[in-house]
Amino acid sequence: MALLSEKSIFTLSNTEGAELNLKQKQFLDTYIGLPLVYLHIALARLLGFILRRNHHVEQAPNEICIIKLLGFGSVIMASDALYSLKVKYPDARLTIICSKSIEEGIRSIRLFETVYVIDDRNFFRLVCSSLATVARLQRRRRLWIADLEVYSKLTGILSAWTLALNRFGFYFNQVPFRYNLYTHHVYFNTVINVEDNYEEMVRAMGVTAITPYTIKGFPPRQQGKAYTYIALNNTCSELARERRLTDAQLQALCSELLRLTPYKIALLGAPSDREANEQFLDSHNFDRAQITNIAGQYEFEAYYRFLYEECALMVTIDSAPLHIANKLNIPNLSIWGPTSPQSRIDLNTANEYLYLGVNCSPCAHFVDKLPCGGDNFCIKNITTAPIINKIQKLLLLYSGHDTDKTFL
């Protein structure tokens, strides 16, 4: 659970039918998690002194359990590092603890043998599913835990309660208390690519070589294939909604793509984004034969197949579809504002990115209150012309068939 705590009124009256939103989860992590952290630090030190367990990594584990409650895109970014653990320890089961909200995505990449689900839809389910997961893991012999959350307090406590022989976790100066919750500590460097931090984590676990992970059934795409759509994603999680283009920017981009390219547009999104996409299309009277709202239309594997088989490229903000495109070898243009591309993608590929690099960016994930107060001019000041120019570069590089429209 991400920290980024906001002072908001919260009540534990969330019963079976009341869903927890992001702010409430942050409240739990901050105001319940912090007192528990210090209690568990004291307990961990006492038990460590009494038990004198051997935390060396020479003896291979029977199970390696990853903790990543939020952020499906982060799991995709970590997939090469995590797959390298399977290569290093072929006899160990690779499992993951994740939240209900990303369970389907986690299962779709087929990297983990078991998915332990924390049902965070309300407080009651959160507590019960957490206790059930801990109880299952406490029975495991030679269990290792790798906590990929960076800001969370409660995931550190969760890892301690599994009684894992070795617990690996990130630390840096914004969350110094985390250093006391794990047996092995990995510095999280905020100025390098996050994938490099994940690789440092698995190196601390004994990995010496990183083996790329590919989703089965999606080899590198062949040049010359004709595609129908350009995939367009302007959706993201609750955290840092300021990553999104404005409605006016999205409308202008769609209009130019339809005018200047031979492709139709596929608007991406989760089931929860479908209504917003419909409202956008209705408000601008777009021809529904030219723009398709596929938000929530496909199960994950069919969604991957649609992107891979039907889309010439993807245009997206900083969100999970970007990392899906990279994993599926789909050309893409990514648009950045309150987050920075150098921390999330490889800048040395043929893919394109657009980033104004204003003085206050990156800010998301680092501060509770954004410097702009939510007026995300780092995104709003991006005009359509440079986006179109970068799309042109991608199409000229990857398109191998004639078109009936002249592209700029």
Image (cartoon, rainbow, N blue to C red):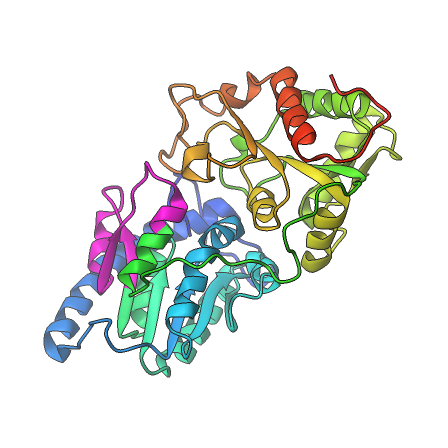
- x%, y% of residue 87? 42, 69
Q: Report the front residue among 63 and 84.
A: 84
> Is residue 178 highlighted in magenta?
yes
Q: How many marks?
A: 0
Q: Residue at x 65, y 16 (%)?
A: 385
Q: Report the front residue among 268 and 59.
A: 59
In which quarter of the view is residue 194 placed?
top left
Q: Residue at x 41, y 63 (%)?
A: 84
Q: In the displayed structure, would residue 331 be above or below residue 168?
A: above
- The quarter in which the C terminus is drawn is top right
> Is residue 74 highlighted in magenta?
no
From the viewer's perspective, tell me whether residue 115 is left or right of residue 303: left
One can see residue 236 in this view: yes
- x%, y% of residue 168? 29, 62
Q: In the displayed structure, would residue 126 be above or below residue 324?
A: below
Q: Report the front residue among 18 and 72.
A: 72
Q: Report the front residue among 234 and 322.
A: 322
Q: Residue at x 37, y 53 (%)?
A: 198
One can see residue 69 in this view: no
- x%, y% of residue 75? 48, 55
Q: In the displayed structure, would residue 175 be above or below residue 64?
A: above
Q: In the displayed structure, would residue 128 be above or below residue 296?
A: below
The range drawn in magenta is 168-197
- x%, y% of residue 380? 56, 19
In the current view of this chain or complex, which residue is farthest to the left? 49
In which quarter of the view is residue 202 placed?
bottom left
In which quarter of the view is residue 354 placed?
top right
